[in-house]
Image: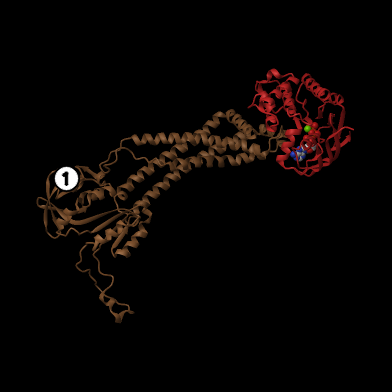
Chain colours: A red, B brown
Amino acid sequence: MSEIILEAKNISKYFHDPLTIQVLKDINFSINKSDFVAVTGRSGCGKSTLLYILSTMDTDYTGDLYIDGIKMGNKKEGELAIVRNEKIGFVFQFHYLLNEFSVLRNVMLPGLKLGKYDEKEIEARAYEKLKILEIENEALKSPNQLSGGQKQRVAIARALINDPLIIMGDEPTGNLDKKNSEIVFNIFQELSQVYNQTLLIVTHDNDFADRTDRIIEMEDGKIISI
Amino acid sequence: MNLKLLFSVSKSLLFARWKQTLVAAIGVTFSITMFITLLSFMSGLNDLLDGLILNRTPHVRLYNEIQPSKKQPIDYAEKHKNDYNFVNSVKPKNERLEIYNNGAIINVLKKDKRILGIAPKITAQVFYNVGAIDLTGVINGIDVEEENRLFMFKDYVTAGNYINLKNIPNSIVLGKGAAEKMMTNIGDVIQVTTIKGERMQLKVVGYFQSGLQDIDKVQSYTSLSTAQKLLGESNSYITDIQIKLKDITLAPSLTIEYQKLFDVEAIDIQTANSQFETGSSIRTLISYAVGITLLIVAGFGIYNILNMMIYEKMDSIAILKATGFSGKDVNLVFIIIALTIGIFGGMLGLLFGFSLSALIDQIPFNTAALPTIKTYPINYNPKFYIIGSIFSIVTTYLAGYFPSRKASKIDPVIIIRGK
Ligand SMILES: Nc1ncnc2c1ncn2[C@@H]1O[C@H](COP(=O)(O)OP(=O)(O)OP(=O)(O)O)[C@@H](O)[C@H]1O
Ligand SMILES: [Mg+2]
């Protein structure tokens, strides 16, 4: 029996503007350590909404969320920030790197925030992550000097810097061409197989989904198959 | 560790928009420069104008005034003690202006620890005789050394040596205006007549220039003994006792005390020169108002630039939050940015303010009315610098407070979803 990393219990979510609609309806599932999970479903079925709740950024929901066995429901904003920093790596559809910092610094920032290692060590670790993603040569460039695929790999390196319990991605390949999508997907697969990294990735790409360990399919705010 | 990181994030954001940052900082620099210069100059000017009068005015002056007695004989009558007594057309009796028993009073005052010094004085109405014409004048008989120590007599004797007044018998320091009218030179002998008709020859040893034309046209100075001789009085005759206190604010209360104690008239400097204080305080008020207005305008500049920066950096803020920076961290980042602008701009402002006032201090400013002044007056009171720096920090903090709070409240979900 493998260790449960993330657990959703009866999670529901309503939007009140312009009308009150229920976007998530009683979501229940759990993710074990080293799982590589894809979330699929039609556009507008609530995948992103669910992911924001699971990543603790959205706190306006009913039901319970457990990360690493700890209930997130009654934590304060500052405490949730620490959870995100320490336990969750997030990869967005748009790479969202900070152009004011070099690629290396972008990767280092969450590590510096966590403060578990000193700056020298964090730098070494950032290089290590960039090496896994084969972009260590771009480390000193500014993010806006990189291609879209390269940026997305930097974003993945950043998600990895604190050795998170789980990496979440909201259509991380959605903005990339076939070739780059393939590269990014292979990276996820490598992370899963070689490093036993737990991953939860929302995707539209069925080829992508089919190659993961497990698919969670959603429809109209409900999970229809786990 | 965390703070160091926040500083580095602030630094990067600052340098990413260094032009706007510079403009904001220049705004603060400019306003602090003007604040310092304005206040230094205004208060220099105030000191100068106040000095004209206040330096030379005793803090408390004891004198005797010819006036009808407050208690008429009937008031002393046992029979009418409880009645209201009305006496019409009361006239003062032929009294002298002398302070009686002044030796004893001075001895008591000399023991008073609150007093810095005492200078006795005689004022006498005279006529300066110029050919067939008599000019009215006032001669002040003074204790030359004390007068100089307490009221800077020397500074106002613009020609001749003030100490000759003490050393040469029957000498006079003429008011500049009076001297011009009489066309006398130093070393000449002039003749004065007292109101009782006595005449006396006096040797001119210097000119006195207070800066107030009306005074310089009438006032002259002699030593105490010369004045006593002129009036034909004994060497204990004194009409005024001028007192300088260690703490000027005590003047009004001490005035009342001495009035009761010595049974003489007394007036304090605040009452005698209230109009000067009003003028000074209004000038000071205006300078502060202008200075603070400049700072507030600079504050709005900072506010705008931070708001713009936050608007532009919305995505970056969302990412920082998504990767584990708390609202408090983001808030601090922007407060640090605001304070950096304030502190750097403010420090430069203090420096420029100092330089500018030092420059003004060098500009020649000669006026016949102010003999002791050669350049524009500047007051380098550290108080202005302290107020300036506190204000620059407080306004930039306030200007940064609301934008920072807005930044800290940014919901990353909305930004990320909004793409
Ligand atoms: N702020 C909001 N206010 C009201 N309704 C919202 C809001 N955000 C999302 N919704 C609605 O919630 C539903 C789920 O949205 P969500 O973004 O989770 O869909 P999704 O499954 O991620 O779709 P896609 O695959 O297109 O990204 C949609 O019907 C959407 O219109
Ligand atoms: Mg979505």
- Residue B182 in picture, x, y percent from top left: 14, 47
- Residue A133 in picture, x, y percent from top left: 75, 21
Q: Label 1: chain?
A: B
**Circle 1 sits on which residue?**
B205
Q: Quadrant of ligand 1?
A: top right
Taking A220 as reference, is A185 above or below it?
A: above
Residue B365 or residue B157, whichever sits in front:
B157
Q: Is mark 1 within 8 Å of ligand 1?
A: no
- The picture quadrant where one finds residue A9 is top right
Furthest-top residue in view? Answer: A137
Furthest-bottom residue in view? Answer: B79
Q: Is A125 positioned to the left or the right of B161 in the image?
A: right
Q: Amino acid at mark 1?
A: Val
Q: Is A223 positioned to the left or the right of B136 in the image?
A: right
Furthest-left residue in view? Answer: B132
- Residue B25 in picture, x, y percent from top left: 51, 34
- Name the image quarter holding the C terminus of chain B: top right
Taking A43 as reference, is B108 above or below it?
A: below
Disc 1, SS: strand
Residue B63 or residue B311, whichever sits in front:
B63
Q: Is residue B178 visible?
A: no
Residue at point 78%, 29% (across, down): A169
Rate crowding at label 1 as few (under 14), some (14 to 19) or many (20 or more) other CA atoms within 10 Å.
many
